[in-house]
Amino acid sequence: MAPGKEAQRVVVVGAGPVGALAAIYAATRGDTVEVYELRADLRDPSTTPLNFTKSINLALSERGINAMRAASADNLLDEVLDETIPMHGRMIHGRRKNGQLFQEPQAYDVHGRFIRAADRAVLNKRLLDALEKMPNVKFFFNHKLVGADFNANTAWFEQRDRAKRTDHAQNPTSNDRSASEHEDSTSSRAREITVKFDFLIGADGAHSATRYHLMKYAQLSYQQEYIDALWCEFHINPRPPDSSFAISPNHLHIWPGTSFMFIAIPSNDKSFTCTLFAPSTCFSSLSQDPETSLAAFFAENFPGVCPDLISPKALLQQFRDNPHLPLISIKCTPYHYKSSAVILGDAAHAMVPFYGQGMNAGLEDVRVLFGFLDRHGVYDPASSSSSSQARRSEALAQYTSQRTPDAAAINELALRNYEEMRAGVVSPLYKARKYVEEGISRYAPGLGFATQYSRVSFGNERYSEVVRAVEWQADVLIGLGRGTALAIFVGSVVWLLRGRIRAFRGS
């Protein structure tokens, strides 16, 4: 930063993993960062998640890991990875025609690479703890974004909790004078504060308030879709008497069905967080008489779950207590407005969870965004404030231009992967293609073949480029298949003709 140049004031809306990582990136570049979060401190176990579930396990893969690696935060990545569980592949559960239960492992990668099961709350805590150590960061929990003027670079937040609290050890909210505050004349209404900023980053989830206000300024195209499926969380306890894992901890477990599936992801306490995905009509049917239908439904479609892993009583209790939630897919563009604001993560591109890339894509957003800001010289110490603003505007435009097709690509891949997980994983065609692609990748790496899953989960190739590479591979394999079939056909014809010629000569 040039001598006398004032640090830019960055407001981050949302203190989840994506917002927290964005704040770290900004703070390490010298920005004065303020993080505003609708909920209470997310490190407090009593804070209720927005989806009202107690624990959501995530699949952490290379894109998310690489984004944290590039954050320049001391020991952050090591601390996060230390609390994850390696998952080397899927474990497919089912029942054979003779009634015997089976478990079939399917490795994720022919080269031994793996994804990691991560507890969302633990990951969020590590990111917020890293932020709390930075003197140029302030937290404002229980603050709801209620308005924004992106031409005047001004935002308004409603302070939902009037009780005195210290959101940051170094910067008590109750004593902060960085924002102009005014009490509403009606005591029953919450206090509203006015916040000026140079740059606002919206990472406030699928139902983003930032995106809502951005629509008033940017010519933002928006598409929202709910797929015909709901999800409900279940829990597999550790196995007594030694509290060990009830099933393999190093796999993502799948009980596939034609139109529904049940999955289980390991947790550090040796339990499993499980999810039932099924059409809304299925949930409606089960909800009519769960006492008699639920256990029978699981016994028929998810063999080995109940009563082996979850008792009928616990299954029924969890089905009743845990919400049946929809799955949303969101696409929009542009992600920014001039040099003032940008949206990241689910706020920009919420996706269904079937590729395990929602959080990873959001964390990658942060790395890609700040990569553009760096390359355009926004943080050049010699640049003036007006120059930095112009450069940021150019960087945001290029960020939107690159990231929009990538987000659309992984959004579509996630939708398609639902079919693969609930049905394709047991398909002979799926297994054959996976076998061929992995064989080429292992024995002829120079050809550049890799499975789609490996490209998405174990590399940092742009999502849109992954789609093109996979389409090219499919064309090559189809061509080889046709060539092989043609060669076999021609060989057979030649063999038959030769046989007839010999027979004719012999006569």
Image (cartoon, rainbow, N blue to C red):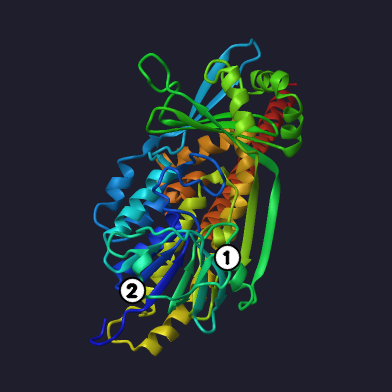
| Position of residue 167 in the picture relative to residue 478 (left or right) | left
Q: In this orientation, which residue lies closer to the viewer: 416 or 360? A: 360
Q: Does 107 sit above or below residue 21?
A: above
Looking at the rendered image, the quarter that the N terminus falls into is bottom left
Report which quarter residue 12 is drawn in: bottom left
* Label 2 CA crowd tier, 10 Å (few <14, some 14–19, many 20+): many
In contact (CB < 8 Å): disc 2 and disc 1? no
Label ID, residue 189: 1
Residue drawn 52% across the image and 21% down it: 103
State left or right for residue 327 relative to residue 284: left
Q: Quadrant of residue 6?
A: bottom left
Picture layout, residue 296 above or below residue 230: above
Secondary structure at badge 1 equals loop
Q: Which mark is residue 210?
A: none
User: Which mark is in front, 2 or 1?
Assistant: 1
Image location (x, y in percent) of residue 51? 57, 46
Choose between 60 and 139: the one closer to the eye. Answer: 139
Residue 454 lies, in percent from the top left, at: 46, 45
Badge 2 marks a residue whose secondary structure is loop
Residue position marked by numbered label 2 in the rendering: 31
**Residue at horizontal 34%, vertical 89%?**
384
Q: Disc 1 residue type?
A: Arg
Q: In the image, what residue occupies the spot 25% across and 87% down?
A: 4
Q: Position of residue 202 (x, y in %)?
A: 50, 66
Ranked by sequence position, the earlier of labels 2 and 1 is 2
Of the pair 10 and 493, the residue shown nearer to us: 10
Three-letter amino acid code of the residue under disc 2: Asp
Measure the alpha-carbon separation of dots 2 and 1: 33 Å
Regarding residue 463, the answer to whether it shows in the image is: yes
